[in-house]
Image (tube, grey):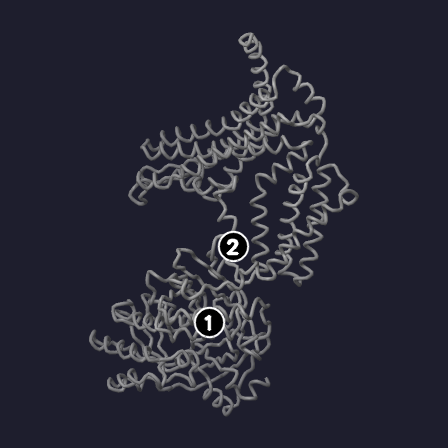
C-alpha cells in the first residue's frame, strides 16, 4: 500500500516541481542575461584583449568595482526565485488549491524549494562554465585556473543558497507579496542598513570613533562596522573573495602560486554558511507546515516581524539624513529634518503593509522613533564608556600617535611606524602623516596625558575665526589618531578629526621624548638619505635672495651632517617650533630632482629638498661654517622692494588644504594663490621704518597654529619670499590693520 501511494504521488511531485520551475523562468532568464552581458563586456575590453602577461585569467571583472554588481545579481535572482515559488501562499484561493493537490505540506515545500534553488543556481553554473572555457581557449589551463574557478563556483552557489533560504523563511512568515518583498529586503540587507546607519551616527556623535573614518589622505583609519561584519553578512561574506579570485595573473610580474592561492581559500566560512542555510531551510519548512491558511492576504500578522521590517528602513533614513544635513544646517535642525524623513519612510512601509500609518498602532510609531532617539542619546553621552576609555599603563605594549612635527624628519621612518605622505601642489606646504610608535615606558605616560586632555575637551565645533584668543578653547581642523597595542593582543584605536591648539602643542612636546629624539637622531645619519649623500648643498640667506652652491668632499660633507645632527639632538621642541627670532640663514640639501630655477613658479628648491634653519642655538653648525669660511653666505645682499602682510589662515581653502599642517617654513613661490591669508586682510607696508620693525620680528620657521600673519617680501627680480609673524610679536599697527 505504501509503495502504491508513493508511485501515485510521483506525477504530482513532478508536476509541483515543474510548476515551480516555470514560476522562476523570468528571474532566471534575467540573471543569465545579466551574467552574459558582464562576460561580453569584460572579454571585449581593450585592456583584457591587449594583456601580455603570461597565464592571465579574467573570470568576470577587469575592475573590482564590478564585484558588488555580480554578487548583487546572484542575491537578487535567488530572492526573486524564492518569492516566485511561494507567491501562492499570499492568495487565499491559490493556497487552498495547492494545499489540496494530494501532497503533504512537507512534500509541497521541498519540491518547490528544490526547483527554485535549482533555477537560481543554474545561471551561475552556466556562467562559470562559459568563463572557464573562454579563459581556457584564450590562455590555456593550469591548476590555479581550475582551483579558482571551482572555488568561485562553490562560493557563488552558497551565496545563492543562503539568499534563497533566507527569503524562503521570511516569505513563509508573511501574508502579502508586498510584506514578503519588504521583509526579504530587510532580512538580506537589514544588517548592512543597520550597521551603515549606526556608523553614520557614530561618526557624527561619538567622540573618538575610528570606524569608517577617512584621514586627510583618504585612507581608512579603521574599516567601517559594515566591513568588520562581512563574515556574518549574507550579502558580503563572499564579496572579498570574489574580488580576489576574479582575476589571476600567474606570470612573472605577479606571483600567484598554488600555495598562495590555496592559503586564501576560506572553506570553513563557506561551509559554515552552507550549514546555516540548511538550518534556515529546516526552520522555513517547520513554519510552512504550521502556517495558518487564514493569514493569506493579511499583512502584519506578526507584530515583531512588522516592527523589524518598519524599523530598519526608518532607522537608516533617519541616520543618513542626519549625517547629510549636519554639514548644511545646525545639528539640532539636522535631527529634526532626519526625524521627519524617518517618519515619512515609516509611513511608506506601513502603506506597503496596506495599513493607514497614523490611524492604527500608535505604539509602533512611538517605538520606532524611540529606538532611533535611544541610539542618539547613547552615542551622544559617550557610547557606554567608549569615549572615555583609555587603557591603563600596565595594559599597553606600545602606542602610536599622529606626528605633527617637522616634515624634515619624514626620512626617519622605520618599518614600525606607519607613514602617509603626500606632496603638496604649491610651495613648501605639503602634508604628511606619520603614526610614531612609543614603546618606552617613560614615554607612554606622556602620550596617555595627551589622550586624556583630548577626551577632556570633547567634541567641539571648529572655531571659525583666525585670531586665537585662547589656545585652550580654539579648535582647528587637524586630525589626531591614537592606536594602542595591548599586551593581551587586542587593539584600541581612537580618531579625532579636530583638536584644540593647546592639545596640538602638547603633541608637539612629544618631540622631547626619548622615542622622537632617537628617531630624529637616526634620520640624520649620513648614509640614511640620498640628498645627504649626493644631493646638492646650498647656503642662502633667510629670504633665498642669494644662494651659494657648496661642493664639499665626502669627509667635509660628513662633518657638516654630524654638526647638524649634534645641534638638532640637543634642540628642544620649544626651540624647534617656537624660536625667539628668525634664523641666521638656511642650509638646503636638494633631493633627487635638484634645485629649481628662479623662474619656476615654485621658487628655488623642490619639495624633496631638506631645509635646516640655522639659529643661534646651532652652535656646532655655526662653528663649522665659520671654520670653512661659509658663514658669510647667510648675509642679506639684496634690497627689499615691497612688503605685504595678511592674517594667517588657520582654516585653509580646499586648494590650500596642504597648509593644514601649520608648521610654517619660509619659502619662495611666484604664485599669488599661495599668499595663504584671510580674505581682505592683506595690507601693503610701504613705510621703511615699519618694514624694518616687521623684519626684526619675523620667523623663518614657526608653528603657526597660535595665529599670526604671513609676510610676503619682494626683492629686485626675485621670486617673492613668504615668512611668518607670530601674533604675540606683531606690532600694533599690524594688529590694528
Question: Regarding mark 2 in the picture, which secondary structure is present there?
Answer: loop
Residue wearing tag 1? 449
Mark sitting on residue 633: none
Residue 632: percent from the left, percent from the top? 31, 87
Question: Regarding mark 1 in the picture, which secondary structure is present there?
Answer: helix
Residue wearing tag 2? 212
Placement of 249 over or under 552, stated as above or below: above
Mark 1 nearby-residue class (10 Å; few <14, some 14–19, many ≥20):
few
Placement of 317 over or under 169, stated as above or below: below
**Is residue 52 shown to the viewer in this render?**
no
Residue 429: percent from the left, percent from the top? 45, 70
> Residue 148 or 30: which is nearer the viewer?
148
**Is residue 121 shown to the viewer in this render?**
yes
Which quadrant would residue 94 be assigned to in this image? top right
Query: Which residue is painted at 52% across and 29% down in the image?
Result: 32
Q: Which part of the image, by quadrant, shows the N terminus?
A: top right
Residue 34: percent from the left, percent from the top? 53, 33
Amino acid at each position: 500500500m505504501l509503495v502504491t501511494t508513493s508511485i501515485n504521488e510521483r506525477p504530482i511531485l513532478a508536476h509541483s516541481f515543474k510548476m515551480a520551475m516555470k514560476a522562476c523562468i523570468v528571474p532566471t532568464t534575467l540573471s543569465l542575461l545579466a551574467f552574459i552581458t558582464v562576460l561580453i563586456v569584460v572579454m571585449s575590453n581593450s585592456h583584457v584583449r591587449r594583456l601580455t602577461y603570461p597565464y592571465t585569467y579574467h573570470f568576470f571583472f577587469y575592475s573590482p568595482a564590478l564585484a558588488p554588481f555580480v554578487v548583487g545579481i546572484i542575491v537578487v535572482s535567488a530572492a526573486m526565485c524564492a518569492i516566485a515559488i511561494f507567491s501562492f501562499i499570499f492568495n487565499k484561493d491559490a493556497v487552498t488549491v495547492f494545499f489540496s493537490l494530494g501532497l503533504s505540506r512537507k512534500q509541497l515545500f521541498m519540491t518547490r524549494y528544490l526547483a527554485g534553488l535549482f533555477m537560481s543556481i543554474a545561471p551561475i553554473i552556466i556562467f562559470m562554465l562559459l568563463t572557464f572555457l573562454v579563459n581556457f581557449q584564450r590562455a590555456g589551463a593550469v591548476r590555479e585556473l581550475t582551483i579558482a574557478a571551482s572555488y568561485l563556483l562553490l562560493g557563488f552557489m552558497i551565496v545563492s543558497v543562503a539568499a534563497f533560504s533566507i527569503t524562503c523563511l521570511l516569505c513563509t512568515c508573511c501574508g502579502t507579496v508586498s510584506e514578503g518583498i519588504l521583509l526579504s529586503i530587510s532580512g538580506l540587507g537589514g544588517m548592512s542598513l543597520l550597521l551603515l546607519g549606526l556608523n553614520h551616527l557614530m561618526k557624527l556623535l561619538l567622540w573618538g570613533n575610528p570606524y569608517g573614518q577617512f584621514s586627510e589622505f583618504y585612507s581608512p583609519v579603521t574599516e567601517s562596522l559594515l566591513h568588520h561584519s562581512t563574515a556574518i553578512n549574507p550579502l558580503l561574506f563572499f564579496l572579498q573573495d570574489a574580488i580576489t579570485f576574479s582575476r589571476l595573473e600567474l606570470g612573472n610580474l605577479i606571483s600567484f602560486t598554488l600555495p598562495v592561492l590555496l592559503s586564501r581559500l576560506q572553506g570553513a566560512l563557506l561551509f559554515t554558511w552552507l550549514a546555516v542555510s540548511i538550518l534556515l531551510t529546516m526552520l522555513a519548512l517547520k513554519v510552512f507546515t504550521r502556517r495558518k491558511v487564514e493569514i493569506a492576504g493579511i499583512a502584519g500578522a506578526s507584530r515583531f516581524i512588522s516592527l523589524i521590517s518598519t524599523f530598519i528602513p526608518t532607522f537608516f533614513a533617519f541616520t543618513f539624513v542626519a549625517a547629510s544635513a549636519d554639514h548644511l544646517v545646525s545639528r539640532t535642525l539636522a535631527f529634526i529634518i532626519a526625524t521627519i524623513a524617518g517618519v515619512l519612510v515609516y509611513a511608506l512601509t506601513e502603506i506597503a503593509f496596506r495599513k493607514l500609518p497614523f490611524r492604527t498602532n500608535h505604539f509602533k510609531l512611538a517605538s520606532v522613533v524611540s529606538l532611533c532617539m535611544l541610539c542618539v542619546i547613547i552615542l551622544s553621552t559617550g557610547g557606554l564608556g567608549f569615549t572615555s576609555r583609555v587603557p591603563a599603563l600596565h595594559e599597553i605594549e606600545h602606542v602610536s600617535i599622529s606626528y605633527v612635527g617637522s616634515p624634515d624628519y619624514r626620512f626617519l621612518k622605520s618599518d614600525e611606524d606607519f607613514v602617509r605622505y603626500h606632496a603638496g601642489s604649491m610651495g613648501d606646504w605639503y602634508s604628511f602623516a606619520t603614526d610614531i610608535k612609543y614603546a618606552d615606558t617613560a614615554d607612554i605616560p606622556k602620550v596617555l596625558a595627551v589622550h586624556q586632555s583630548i577626551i577632556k575637551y570633547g567634541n567641539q565645533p571648529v572655531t571659525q575665526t583666525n585670531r586665537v584668543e585662547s589656545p585652550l578653547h580654539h579648535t582647528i581642523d587637524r586630525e589626531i589618531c591614537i592606536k594602542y597595542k595591548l599586551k593581551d593582543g587586542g587593539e584600541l584605536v581612537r580618531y579625532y578629526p579636530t583638536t584644540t591648539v593647546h592639545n596640538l602643542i602638547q603633541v608637539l612636546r612629544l618631540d622631547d621624548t626619548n622615542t622622537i629624539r632617537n628617531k630624529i637622531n637616526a634620520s640624520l645619519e649620513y648614509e640614511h638619505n640620498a640628498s645627504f649623500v649626493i644631493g646638492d648643498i646650498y647656503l642662502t640667506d633667510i629670504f633665498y635672495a642669494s644662494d651659494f652652491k657648496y661642493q664639499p668632499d665626502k669627509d667635509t660633507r660628513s662633518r657638516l651632517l654630524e654638526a647638524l645632527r649634534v645641534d638638532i639632538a640637543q634642540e628642544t621642541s620649544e626651540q624647534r617650533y617656537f624660536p625667539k627670532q628668525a634664523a641666521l640663514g638656511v642650509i638646503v640639501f636638494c633631493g633627487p630632482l635638484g634645485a629649481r630655477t628662479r623662474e619656476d613658479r615654485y621658487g628655488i628648491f623642490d619639495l624633496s629638498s631638506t631645509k635646516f634653519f640655522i639659529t643661534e642655538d646651532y652652535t656646532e653648525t655655526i662653528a663649522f661654517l665659520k671654520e670653512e669660511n661659509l658663514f658669510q653666505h647667510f648675509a642679506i645682499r639684496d634690497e627689499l622692494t615691497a612688503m605685504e602682510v595678511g592674517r594667517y589662515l588657520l582654516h585653509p581653502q580646499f586648494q590650500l588644504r596642504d597648509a593644514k599642517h601649520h608648521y610654517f617654513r619660509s619659502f619662495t613661490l611666484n604664485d599669488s594663490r599661495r599668499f595663504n591669508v584671510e580674505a581682505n586682510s592683506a595690507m601693503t607696508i610701504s613705510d621703511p621704518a615699519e618694514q624694518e620693525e616687521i623684519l626684526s620680528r619675523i620667523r623663518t620657521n614657526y608653528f603657526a597654529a597660535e595665529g599670526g600673519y604671513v609676510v610676503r617680501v619682494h626683492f629686485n627680480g626675485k621670486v617673492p619670499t613668504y615668512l611668518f609673524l607670530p601674533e604675540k610679536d606683531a606690532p600694533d599697527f599690524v594688529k590694528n590693520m
